[in-house]
Amino acid sequence: MSDSTFYNQITETFHWFHQNPELSFEEYETTGRIREFLEYYNIRILDLDLKTGLAAEIQGGNDGPVIALRCDIDALPVQEETELPYASAITGKMHACGHDFHTTVMLYVAKELQEQRKHLHGRIRILFQPAEESSVGALEVIKTKVLDDVGGIYGLHTDITLPVGTVGIVSGSVTAAVDRFTVRLTGKGTHAAHPQDGIDPVLTASQIVTLAQSIVSRNIDPFSQGLLSITRVAAGNTWNVIPQTAELEGTVRTMGRHNRRRFRTLVQHIALSQGAEAEIEWLAGPPATNNAPCFEPVAAAVATEQGLKVKTSSPSLGGEDFAFYQEKIPGFFIRIGTGESYPNHHPKFQVDTNALKPAIDYFTALAQKTLFAIKSGELIPAQEEASDD
């Protein structure tokens, strides 16, 4: 197959996924398309108890270790505004985070590895994971025990800050731990002209919005990374009534295991000072990704061999449920340059399809070299402790 024919085939696959986005845990057609592709190339599909998503395995001709490659397959509830000829055909849904790119890359990595399987020094398991945007898709995959005999795992993500032909590689923290909170305040409603007869939850909420920022500026080590954003404030429904309740919602992002107690204490004390009551609902999301340093040399070496430029990834306060895998086994998350674009989750987000083939070639070679390095003893996967910042 000529390079141009192969490129056309890859882009056609990518276009289909982009045109047919499905949300978390709804990826039925996506899963079906992945299955058809794998079956066409006689790639073994593992029997897992998953509603959507699946895993494939390539068995090498030599006994050896087992490693995994992971991609995510879900889309976002975003109305696309790119005007691409292959734009989303589904109203209100869009691949605005590059998961269509990830899926396409890993399908063709599976194809290439299947064709070269006799030369592999072990087994490679490829996870087509559902529901990354829900932050719990990885947990569903882990429940299947598909990783119980896996020695290490690689993940990938598009990066609009890196040009095509560049990979972002770094050990340690890459993305943040993500928590979500809701604060419900109860005061005492009254006429706006008689505030002395009530307890104003709007005033209490306003103080929390302002003083919560002191946690980042005064309670966290200035050399660490973190943020606290209150993104929704709701109270009242008319102009001349002090309402009974108010509600705040937001997120905390950190690169380590920071104690969340300070936020709870601040909210409760502010509410108490105003005579209001506060109820806090805390929803813990994925932890921070923590790349095991043992994989960095091989990841960088393969990139150089493939003619790619290597740059040190900048940490992001975005979240990534790949971190759940890294809590179980050593892992390494790699960023793939896909050219300048609007940000992830933006209606005009897009990737440069010229990044597809270099990414396929890179992960194909990386999987092969990692198996060989582990079997020969050059690479000993080690679980690293997450930084406390």
Image: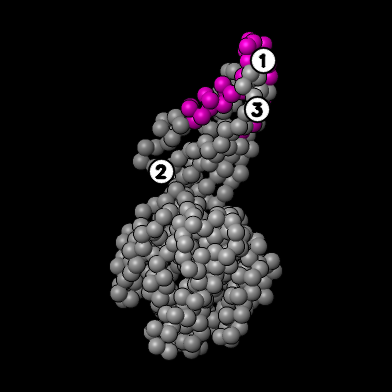
What range is drawn magenta here? 183-212
Q: Is residue 191 visible?
A: yes
Q: Which one is nearer the viewer's eye here, 103 or 173? A: 103
Residue 288 place in picture, x, y as percent: 48, 51
At horizontal 56% and vertical 21% (from top left) the residue drawn is 203
**Tag of residue 333:** none
Q: Residue at x 55, y 52 (%)?
A: 286
Image quadrant in which the N terminus is located: bottom left
Identify the mark nearer the N-term, 2 or 3.
Answer: 2
Q: Residue at x 61, y 83 (%)?
A: 39
Residue labelled with disc 2: 225
What amino acid type should be assigned to the residue bearing mark 3?
A: Asn
Vertical arrangement, residue 2 with respect to residue 335, above or below: below
Tell me if residue 201 is in the magenta stretch.
Answer: yes
Return the residue at label 1. 191
Disc 1/disc 3 C-alpha distance (Å):
13 Å
Q: Mark 2 against mark 3, which lies toward the viewer?
A: 3
Question: Which of 354 and 128 lies nearest the eye of the viewer?
Answer: 354
What is the CA distance from the residue labelled 2 to the residue labelled 1? 44 Å
